[in-house]
Amino acid sequence: MALNVVVCLKQIPNPDLQFQVSADGKDIRRDALTYKVNGADEYALEEAVRLREKHGGRVTAITAGPRRTEQMLREAMAKGADAAVRVAFEEPAAIDAFQIANILAASIRGRPHDLILTGVQSDDYGHSATGPLLAGFLKLPHASVVTRVQLEDRRARVWRELEGGTEEVVLIPMPALLTVQFGMNQPRYAPLPAIMKASRQPIEEVKSGDLGEPTWDAFRGPYVLSVRKVSHPAAKGRAEMIAGKIVDQAKTVARLLREKGVYRG
Amino acid sequence: MTGRDILAVAEHREGRVVGATYELVAKGRDLAAATGGSMRVALLGQGVRALAAEIAALGSEILVAEHEALATYTPGGYAQALAAIVSRSEPRVVLFSHTAQGFDLAPRLAAEWNAPVVANCVDLWLENGRLVASRKILNDKLAMELEVTSERPFLVTLRPGSVKPATPASTAGAVVPVSVTVDPANNGSVFVGYEKPQVQDIDISAADIVVSAGRGIQKRENLAMVEELARVLGGVVGASRPLTDMEWLPKTRQVGQSGKTVRPKVYIACGISGAMQHVAGMRDAGLIIAVNTDPSAPIFEVAHYGVVANVLEFVPALVRELKGG
C-alpha cells in the first residue's frame, strides 16, 4: 500500500521569546522576531515520515504563509518530506483559522491524500481548530489529539489522548485527517547531506489565482473578525516576586518554607 | 434566522458529567441574560437520564437526545444530532468546553455549518449582536481580545477553569427529550474502547509537597537537583509535559490537563513556563512557588511567590540554605 501523506506545518514566532505589543495595539511587534516550526507539527512531520518509511508512498509538506516559511519547508524536506508546497498567503498575523483551513482544503483537494496530519494546536494562537476545520471542508473523517496510529488495510486504528491520562481508541476509515499530540514520537534531526540536498529542491508555490480566486478573501467565512487589542495580561493575582541575588532569594524561600511549617530542618 | 438563544453542549464520559460542563452552564446563563433568550443544554448519549437530571438541577432546560449511535462521542454522530437540534431553533451562540472533545467537534461543525468558530476563550460576551472574546496567545504570555460579527451562530469553545461552575438552582430545569436520527455509517469513526495507564509508580496527587521540573532544567542529568530538593523537603518530583514526552520521567509524574491534577500543600515549579495545560493541574495547590528565568512567564500569574532566576543556580542554593539552616 503506497501511502500519500500530506502534513500541514505552521511557522510561528518562537514562543520562548518575550513579546512586545505593536504600536497599534492589535498585534505583537514583528520586526525583531525569530520564527520556528510549531511544536506539535514537528511530531506530525516525524509521524508522516515514519508512516512512509513503513508503508511506502510519499510525504508532502504544506504550509500557508509568507516567504520566510520556505526555510521551514526545506527543513521538512531535509527530515524526509518528498515534496513541499507553500501556499502564498502573506498575512503575517494570520489569525483566522477558518480562512486558513479553507485555503489549505482548496490546495490539498486535487492532490492524492490517504492521510492528512496536522499538529494538535499551534503554540501562538492555540485554537486547536485548523485540523478539524480542514477535515470538515474536505469532508474527511478526523480524530484529534492522536498519540499513536496503526494502519490496517484501508483504515487507521488511532489512540486519542483525553483529559486525565485516559486514552480513547477509535477506528477511522481512510482517507482521514489526524491531529497529532506532542510526544507522539521522537522527531529526528536532519543529517547534513539532506540539509544540503533540501536547499536545492524546488518548493511549489500556490497562489489564489491557481485555485481560481482573485484574492484570498474568497476563502473567508461568513463573518467579520477583527482584533480589538493585544495586551500583557492584567497583573491581578500576580505572584509576590522575591528579589535579590540568588543567595538572598534562596534564603527568603527557605525562610518562607520554615514559616509555613513545610520544612523543620 | 439566528435567534437569541444559547445552547451549551454537555460532555460526559464513562457515566459522569465532565466538570467543565458546569462552567459552560454558568457562562451560557450570563449570555442568555444579555440576549434575553433562553439558555439550553444539549446532552447527547444513550441511557443518560440520570446525567440529565444532574444537569437540569442547575436550573436550565436540557434537551436530551438518546440514540445507540450516540453511546460514546464521535464527531460524526454528534454532528448529526446537533444539526437536528439547531435546525429547530437556531441559537445565537453554541458553547463547547475546550477539551479533547470540544475542540475536536466545534471547528468541524464550523466548516460543516459555514459558521464562525472562536476557540479556547477565557471569556466572552455579546455587544450589540457582536461576539467579543478574550483569549490567551503565545503560550499565555499575552491576552488578545477580538470581535466577530456574523448572521450565523457563533461556535465557541471555553477554556476549562475560566469561569466559576454553576451550582444547583432552587428550581430544576425541564428535561426535554428530543428525537434525532443518527446514521452510524456517518459517525466518521468507530469507538473501540478506553485505555488507562497502568500505574506502577507513586501517586503524586497524594503528596503534600510536589517539586516539579520543566524545560528550564535543560538537561536530563539536572533532574538530580530537583530530586534532591524534593528529598530534602520530604516531597515528590512532578514534571511538566515536555519532560514526560522526552521520557525523562514517567508519564505518571506529569502534572496537567492530560496528566494528574494535584492539590498539595506546597507546589514548587522549577523552570516551568505555565502553559494552560500545566496550570490546569496545579492551580489549586495551597502554596505555589515558581522559579523561572522569564519574568513574563505565565506561571507567575498563578504562583503566590515568584523567583526570577535560573533554576540550575537557584535550586542548589535553596538546598544549601535548607540543609545549612
Image: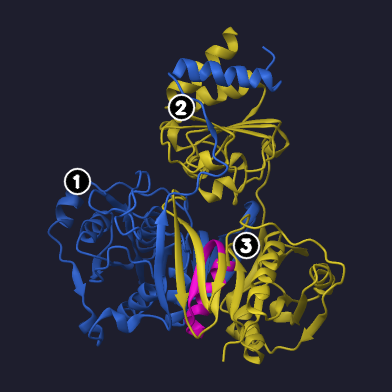
User: Is residue B119 on the magenta stretch?
Assistant: yes
- Counting other residues with Cα less than 10 Å from the Cα at mark 2, is it few (<14), some (14-19), or many (20 or more)? many
User: Between marks 3 and 1, how big is the CA–CA gap?
Assistant: 39 Å
Q: Is residue A37 left or right of residue A233?
A: left
Q: Label 1 is placed on what type of residue?
A: Leu
Identify the residue under disc 2.
B311
> From the viewer's perspective, is the residue at label 3 or at label 2 nearer?
2
Identify the residue under disc 1.
A192
Label 3 SS: strand
Q: Is residue B23 left or right of residue B317?
A: right
Identify the residue under disc 3.
A168
Q: Chain of mark 2?
A: B
Count every numbered label the image shows and give the total.
Answer: 3
User: Between marks 2 and 1, how big is the CA–CA gap?
Assistant: 34 Å
> From the viewer's perspective, is the residue at label 2 or at label 1 nearer?
2
Residue under the point 27% across and 66% down:
A65
Residue segment shown in magenta: B102-123
- Counting other residues with Cα less than 10 Å from the Cα at mark 1, is it few (<14), some (14-19), or many (20 or more)? few
Chain B as rendered: colour: yellow
The chain coloured blue is A
Q: Residue furthest top?
A: B324
Spot occupied by residue A86 in the image (x, y as percentages of width and height): 24, 68
Q: Is residue B263 above or below residue A34?
A: above
